[in-house]
Amino acid sequence: MAEGAPAEGEAQKASEDTKKIVHTYPLVRHSDMPEDTKAEAIDLVVTACEKFSSNNEVRKTYISQPTI
């Protein structure tokens, strides 16, 4: 084995540490919005992501347009 190469167990552990985390639910780290407003915003974003999963520009427009 080469001197500078990591051992096989170390390489596997390193690849496990760098795995991407995928959330299947909306994650809000911090918000100073009231609960009802926060729930509406989350619903709006989730709906936009589900409807327009392949087009980011349309998704952005859907989220940023004023709702009446």
Image (tube, helix red, strand yellow):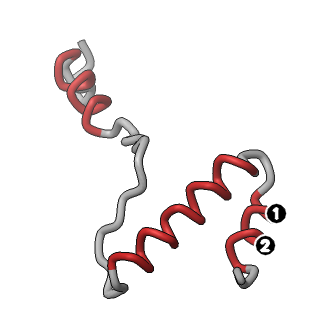
Percent x, y of residue 64: 70, 79
Q: What residue is shown at x 58% (from left), y 63% (from top)? A: 45
Quarter of the image with the C terminus is bottom right
Q: How far apart are labels 2 and 1 at the CA level?
A: 5 Å
Q: Is residue 21 left or right of residue 48?
A: left
**Disc 1 residue type (three-letter):** Val
Residue 2 versus residue 39: which sits nearer the camera?
39
Q: Disc 1 marks which residue?
A: 58
| Residue depicted at x 41% and y 75% | 38
Query: Is 48 displayed left or right of 28 in the figure?
Result: right
Q: Which residue is mark 2?
A: 61
Res 14 → quadrant: top left
Residue 55, position as x, y percentages in the image: 80, 53
Task: Name the residue located 29 percent from the left edge and 76 percent from the top edge.
Answer: 30
What residue type is disc 2 on?
Thr
Determine whether 65 is above or below 40 in the image. below
Q: Position of residue 66 (x, y in %)?
A: 72, 84
User: 15 or 11, which lies in front?
Assistant: 15
